[in-house]
Amino acid sequence: MIVFLDIDGVLHPDPCYDRDLLLSCLPKFESVIREFPGVEIVISSTWREKRSLTELRDLFSPDIAQRIIGVTPSWKDHQGIFNRIGYQRHAEVEAWLRGSSEPWRRWVAIDDKPYLFRPFSNLVKTKSEVGFDDLSEIALRDKLSEAD
């Protein structure tokens, strides 16, 4: 299973004007991921546009950082997929999967912007103003448990 992870609105509230809240939901997210050792992570956040994979990994605890296997490409570089799917972040997920050695792998996305995904997709939606909360945690556990 692969988790496609957004950052703003997921790992902290969005907007996040208080530096003390930056990545404030990360411990809760990491605790869930630790319970599912076969899960790998791909960063789908716009943070990938200004930070290297190493810089992104450095935001996480070492045991979780080693499970971050990449970042999604931009939908702009995959117009054919975007034109077929019509949703930017969903197209980026699809493009990443198609470029991987296992495009059939099960996946779930965690994001606060459902309009970037096809309706009824494998999305755990967070509330932008809160981030990864108890309801998101339950939804993610349910999705990851389905894959076990």
Image (spheres, helix red, strand yellow):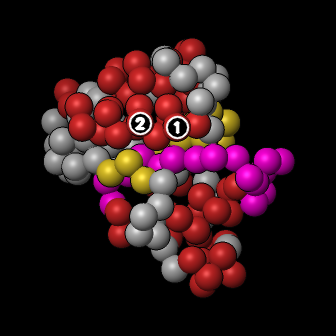
Q: Which residue is drawn at 64% across and 62% down?
A: 94
* Quarter of the figure that contains the N terminus: top right
Instruction: Write down the region rendered in magenta.
Output: 98-113
Question: Helix, strand or loop at disc 2?
Answer: helix
Residue count near mark 1 (Cα–Cα under 10 Å), binned few <14, some 14–19, many ≥20 = few
Q: Where is residue 70 in the image (x, y as percent from the top left)?
A: 65, 42
Decide if residue 88 is in sight here. yes
Taking the image as shown, residue 23 lies to the left or right of residue 100, namely left
| Residue 26 or residue 105, whichever sits in front | 105
Q: Which residue lies furthest to the bottom in this view?
A: 83
Q: Residue 146 carries which label?
A: 1
Give percent across and percent down for residue 4: 53, 46
Q: Which image quarter: residue 64? A: top right
- The residue under the point 74% across, 52% down is 104
Q: Which amino acid does label 2 sit on?
A: Asp
Give me the residue at 33% from left, 23% from top: 28
Circle 2 crowding by C-alpha within 10 Å: few under 14, some 14–19, many from 20: few
Question: Quick one: SS at disc 1?
Answer: helix
Does residue 101 belong to the magenta stretch? yes
Relative vertical location of residue 26 with respect to residue 106 in this rendering, above or below: above
Which image quadrant for residue 24? top left
Q: Quadrant of the C terminus?
A: top right
The reply, left or right, for residue 88 in relation to residue 38 is left
Q: Where is residue 17 in the image (x, y as percent from the top left)?
A: 17, 43
For label 2, the residue is 142
| Residue type (three-letter) at the residue carrying disc 1 | Glu
